[in-house]
C-alpha cells in the first residue's frame, strides 16, 4: 500500500506544555485512519501540523510527497479539511458557501450533489447563523469534500450531531473512502473509532500509546470477555475450575464470569452439564473503551 | 481570478445584508453634508475654505470620509470578527492565497466607496448646487489611490487589533479625529497650530486634499499623492508581516 502521510518524531510545544511528543505514524492510501484520545491529548495539534496549518518544533512530515511547512498552498489543493472552532460568516447562505469554496479549484465536485448527500438541500438558502449545530457541522464537512480531495481530515466531525445524523455521517464517510479518498478521522468517540476506522492511533498526553486495527487493539489490550447469566443456585464453585476462566463474581442472582478465548462455550457446556440452563446467557465483548482504560488508566472523556 | 471575483461578490452581498455597517458608511457623510450645508450654505468666502463655497470644499472631503469609514471602522471590525469566529481559520485551510482575501477587500471597498461617493455628490449637487469636478479624470484617479491606500491601512489595523471590540472602539475614535482635524471638519484657516499639526498627522487629510485639488481646479497634488502611496506601501508590507489567521 502506498503511504500518503508519513510522520516521524513529530514534536510541538506551546511554551512549557508539550502538546505532541515524539509521535510517528503513517497512513496508507484509501484507509480510514483514526486518531483517538481524550480532549487535550494533542490530536488536533497533530493533524494541524500535518496539514501545514501549524508550525512544529521538530520531526518530519510528508503528505502526498509534499512538505507541509514549505508547500502549504499546494498541499491544501489536494486535501480537504474540517477543523474544530472554525466558522463561516454569519449571513452567508448554504449554497453560497458551497459555491464559493468549490470555486477555489478547477476540479471541484458538483456541490449540489454534496448538498443533497449531507442533507442540506432544504437549508439551501438559510444563512450560516440560522443553522443548528449539526447542520453547521454537516456544511463544514461538505466544504471539506468540495474540492474532491485525495485526503480529507475530519476533526471531531460528529460533535454536535444527533445519533441518527451520526450514523448517516458514518455511511457517508465510508462512501468517501469507497471513492478512493483517504480519511483521517480525529475523534474522542470510541464507537465511532471502532466502527469506522481501519487503523487507529491512540494518543494520550501528547504521546502515541498504541497503533493497530480496532480488533487488533482489543485482542492485545482487552482480551477478557465476560459471560453473564442469572442463576438461583448460590453455590457454583466449579465455575472457577473451568479452563480460561479468570474470575467469578455474583451480584444477587446475576453471575459474571470473566475469562479469555473460548470461555463462553466452555462455561455454557459446563452449565448444561450441571443442569443449569439460564435463558439469558450472554457475553459482553470488550470494546475500545476497555482498551483505552487499560492503556491510559483513564477514560476518553477525562 | 475566478476565486477573487467570486469572493468579492459574496463579500458585497454580505455587506448589503449587514444593515448597521451599511447605514454607518453611507449615512455618516450625508449627515455631515446636510448639517454643514444647512449652517454654512455654499457661498464662496475668500477667507476660509480655500476661497470656495463651504460645500464645494466639503463634498470631496466627505467622499474621502466614506473611504475613511470603510477602511478605519469597517475593515478592522470585519477582519477581527472573522478571526474571532474562526472564519479566517476556515479560509486558511482551503487553498486560497492571502492576496485573494486582501484583493477581494480592495474590490469590495472600491465598489462601496464609489456608491457612497456618488451618493454624496448627487446629494450635494441637488441640495446645494455644488460645482462639478474641474478635472474629473484626476478626481477619479485620486479616489482610487485613496481607496487603495486606506484599504491597506484598514487591513493593517485589522491585523494589529486583537478583538472586535477593540476594533470598534479604536476605529470610531480614529475616524472622528480624522474627520474633524483632517479636513472634513472646521476649515483649516480657523484651526490652532496644534490642531493643524494633528490634522497633518492623520492619513485622511492627504486623501481629502488629493481629491479636493483636482475637483476645485488646483491640479494634481504630487506631494500628497506620494504620501498616500507611501502609506499604502508601508501598510501593505506591515500587514503581510503582521497578519494573523487566528
Image (tube, grey):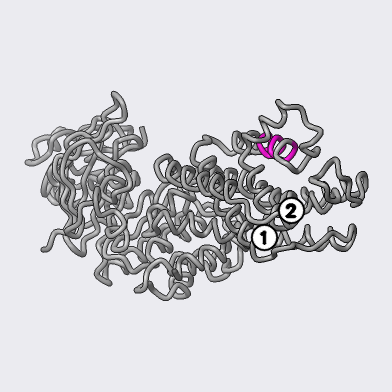
Q: Main secondary structure of the magenta part?
A: helix
The answer to the question of whether label 2 and label 1 lie on touching residues, with beta carbons closer than 8 A, is yes
Residue stretch rendered in magenta on the structure: B172-180
* Res. B246 in view: no
Residue located at (52% from left, 59% from top): B104
Mark 1 lies on residue: B139
Mark 2 lies on residue: B60
Q: Is residue A187 above or below residue B100?
A: above
In this rendering, position of residue B119 left or right of residue B231: right
Name the quadrant containing residue B211: bottom right
Residue located at (37% from left, 69% from top): A105
Residue located at (18% from left, 37% from top): A58
Residue located at (64% from left, 48% from top): B207
Q: Chain of mark 1?
A: B
* Res. B16 in view: yes
- Binning the other alpha carbons within 10 Å of mark 2 as few (below 14), some (14 to 19) or many (20 upward) gives many
Disc 2, SS: helix
In this rendering, position of residue B33 left or right of residue A79: right
Count of numbered tags? 2
In front here: B161 or A257? B161
Amino acid at each position: 500500500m502506498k503511504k500518503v502521510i508519513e510522520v516521524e518524531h513529530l514534536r510541538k510545544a506551546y511554551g512549557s506544555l508539550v502538546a505532541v511528543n515524539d509521535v510517528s505514524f503513517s497512513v496508507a492510501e484509501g484507509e480510514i485512519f483514526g486518531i483517538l484520545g481524550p480532549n487535550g491529548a494533542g490530536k488536533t495539534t497533530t493533524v494541524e501540523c500535518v496539514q501545514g496549518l501549524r508550525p512544529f518544533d521538530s520531526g518530519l512530515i510528508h503528505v502526498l510527497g509534499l512538505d507541509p511547512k514549505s508547500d502549504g498552498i499546494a498541499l491544501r489543493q489536494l486535501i480537504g479539511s474540517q477543523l474544530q472552532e472554525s466558522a463561516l460568516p454569519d449571513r452567508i447562505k448554504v449554497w453560497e458557501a458551497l459555491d464559493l469554496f468549490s470555486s477555489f479549484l478547477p476540479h471541484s465536485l458538483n456541490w449540489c450533489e454534496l448538498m443533497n448527500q449531507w442533507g442540506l438541500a432544504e437549508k439551501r438558502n438559510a444563512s450560516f447563523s440560522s443553522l443548528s449545530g449539526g447542520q453547521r457541522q454537516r456544511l463544514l464537512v461538505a466544504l471539506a469534500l468540495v474540492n474532491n480531495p485525495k485526503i480529507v481530515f475530519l476533526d471531531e466531525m460528529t460533535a454536535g450531531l444527533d445519533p441518527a445524523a451520526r450514523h448517516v455521517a458514518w455511511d457517508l464517510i465510508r462512501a468517501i473512502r469507497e471513492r478512493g479518498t483517504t480519511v483521517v478521522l480525529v475523534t474522542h468517540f470510541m464507537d465511532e473509532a471502532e466502527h469506522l476506522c481501519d487503523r487507529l492511533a491512540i494518543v494520550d498526553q501528547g504521546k502515541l500509546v498504541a497503533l493497530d486495527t480496532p480488533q487488533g487493539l482489543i485482542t492485545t489490550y482487552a482480551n477478557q470477555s465476560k459471560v453473564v447469566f442469572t442463576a438461583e443456585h448460590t453455590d457454583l464453585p466449579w465455575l472457577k475450575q473451568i479452563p480460561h476462566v479468570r474470575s467469578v463474581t455474583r451480584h444477587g442472582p446475576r453471575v459474571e464470569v470473566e475469562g479469555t478465548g473460548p470461555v463462553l462455550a466452555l462455561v455454557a457446556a459446563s452449565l448444561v452439564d450441571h443442569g443449569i440452563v439460564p435463558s439469558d446467557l450472554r457475553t459482553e465483548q470488550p470494546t475500545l473503551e476497555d482498551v483505552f482504560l487499560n492503556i491510559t488508566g483513564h477514560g476518553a472523556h477525562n | 481570478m475566478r476565486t477573487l471575483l467570486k469572493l468579492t461578490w459574496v463579500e458585497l452581498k454580505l455587506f448589503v445584508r449587514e444593515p448597521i455597517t451599511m447605514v454607518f458608511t453611507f449615512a455618516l457623510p450625508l449627515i455631515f453634508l446636510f448639517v454643514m450645508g444647512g449652517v454654512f450654505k455654499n457661498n464662496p468666502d475668500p477667507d476660509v475654505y480655500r476661497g470656495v463655497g463651504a460645500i464645494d470644499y466639503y463634498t470631496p472631503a466627505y467622499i474621502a470620509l466614506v473611504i475613511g469609514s470603510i477602511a478605519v471602522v469597517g475593515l478592522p471590525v470585519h477582519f477581527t470578527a472573522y478571526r474571532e469566529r474562526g472564519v479566517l481559520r476556515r479560509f486558511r485551510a482551503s487553498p486560497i492565497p492571502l492576496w485573494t482575501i486582501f484583493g477581494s477587500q480592495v474590490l469590495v471597498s472600491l465598489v462601496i466607496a464609489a456608491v457612497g461617493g456618488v451618493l454624496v455628490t448627487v446629494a450635494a449637487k441637488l441640495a446645494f448646487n455644488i460645482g462639478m469636478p474641474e478635472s474629473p479624470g484626476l478626481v477619479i484617479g485620486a479616489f482610487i489611490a485613496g481607496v487603495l491606500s486606506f484599504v491597506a491601512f484598514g487591513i493593517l489595523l485589522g491585523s494589529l487589533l486583537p478583538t472586535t471590540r477593540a476594533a470598534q472602539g479604536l476605529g470610531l475614535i480614529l475616524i472622528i479625529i480624522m474627520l474633524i482635524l483632517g479636513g472634513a471638519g472646521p476649515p483649516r484657516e480657523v484651526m490652532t497650530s496644534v490642531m493643524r499639526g494633528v490634522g497633518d498627522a492623520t492619513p485622511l487629510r492627504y486623501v481629502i486634499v488629493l481629491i479636493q485639488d483636482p475637483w476645485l481646479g488646483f491640479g494634481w497634488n504630487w506631494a500628497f499623492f506620494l504620501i498616500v502611496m507611501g502609506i499604502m506601501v508601508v501598510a501593505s508590507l506591515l500587514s503581510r508581516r503582521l497578519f494573523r489567521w487566528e
